[in-house]
């Protein structure tokens, strides 16, 4: 084998080793939590007039739980969620398929949140930038708010704050409350690079 072939073989082995180390390292939530850190911004002592829970994703239920905690800590008086009317699982008690909104209300009820403090935000038709659309939906409500706590998952916190800050400008104080620490959320096991791409897209388009 000539020297050039040996050099290419060494390079291939080196790339394979780097790939193996990267694959093993990123299988640990702690390491993935570190990779999420640049996307993460949260005010642990957040309080406001209302809490808005960002919709969709596998960590939606974590966010609802976190919003329930804010209510019981008397940091917010009302909780707003997206009015997702598509049917979800079948409810044998009601003998009908629940909407995702109804499931959210029932879920928070398990944590002692009364239904009368939970309100829905209509889905806007122009939702190709869904996080921005949710912020605009809150801004379009007939009631005005001077302070809003946005509840979402760690990788989404910076993007969500960007959307609400740009929609509300100086009309309301916006704080973001993360449902978990970066290494503890269900979202930790989702592709992280997608969140970086989304943040760049929202930065230019929101």
Image: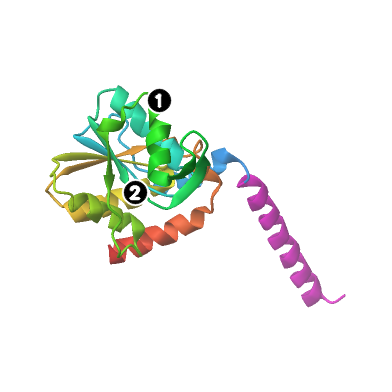
Q: Is residue 155 magenta?
A: no
Q: Is residue 3 magenta?
A: yes
Highlighted range, magenta: 1-26
- Badge 1: residue crowd in 10 Å (few <14, some 14–19, many ≥20): few
- Badge 2: residue crowd in 10 Å (few <14, some 14–19, many ≥20): some
Image quadrant occupied by the N terminus: bottom right
- Residue occupying the point 43% across, 39% down: 103
Q: Which mark is residue 111?
A: 1
Image quadrant occupied by the C terminus: bottom left
Q: Position of residue 156 (x, y in %)?
A: 39, 48
Q: Is residue 156 left or right of residue 31?
A: left
Gap between marks 2 and 1 measured at Cα = 27 Å
Q: Position of residue 167 (x, y in %)?
A: 20, 55
Q: Is residue 16 left or right of residue 117?
A: right
Q: Of residues 41 and 74, which is closer to you in this image? A: 74
- Residue occupying the point 22% across, 49% down: 138
Q: Of residues 96 and 72, which is closer to you in this image? A: 96
Q: Of residues 97 and 77, which is closer to you in this image? A: 97
Q: Which mark is residue 38?
A: none
Question: Compared to 14, does 79 lie above or below?
Answer: above
User: SS of the residue at dot 2?
Assistant: helix
The residue wearing badge 2 is: 158
């Amino acid at each position: 084998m000539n020297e050039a072939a040996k050099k290419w073989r060494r390079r291939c082995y080196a790339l394979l080793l780097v790939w193996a180390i990267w694959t093993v390292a990123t299988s640990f939530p702690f390491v993935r939590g570190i990779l999420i850190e640049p996307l993460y911004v949260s005010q642990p002592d957040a309080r406001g007039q209302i809490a808005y829970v960002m919709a969709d994703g596998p960590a939606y239920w974590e966010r609802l739980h976190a919003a329930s905690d804010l209510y019981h800590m008397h940091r917010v008086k009302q909780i707003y969620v997206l009015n997702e009317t598509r049917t979800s699982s079948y409810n044998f008690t009601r003998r009908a398929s629940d909407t995702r909104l109804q499931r959210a209300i029932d879920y928070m009820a398990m944590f002692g949140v009364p239904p009368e403090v939970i309100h829905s935000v209509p889905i806007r038709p122009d939702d190709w930038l869904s996080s921005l659309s949710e912020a605009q939906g809150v801004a379009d409500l007939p009631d005005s708010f001077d302070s809003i706590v946005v509840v979402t998952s760690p990788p989404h916190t910076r993007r969500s704050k960007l959307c609400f800050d740009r929609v509300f400008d100086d009309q309301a104080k916006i704080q973001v409350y993360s449902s978990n620490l970066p290494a503890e959320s269900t979202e930790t096991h989702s592709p992280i690079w997608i969140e970086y791409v989304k943040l760049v897209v929202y930065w230019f388009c929101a």
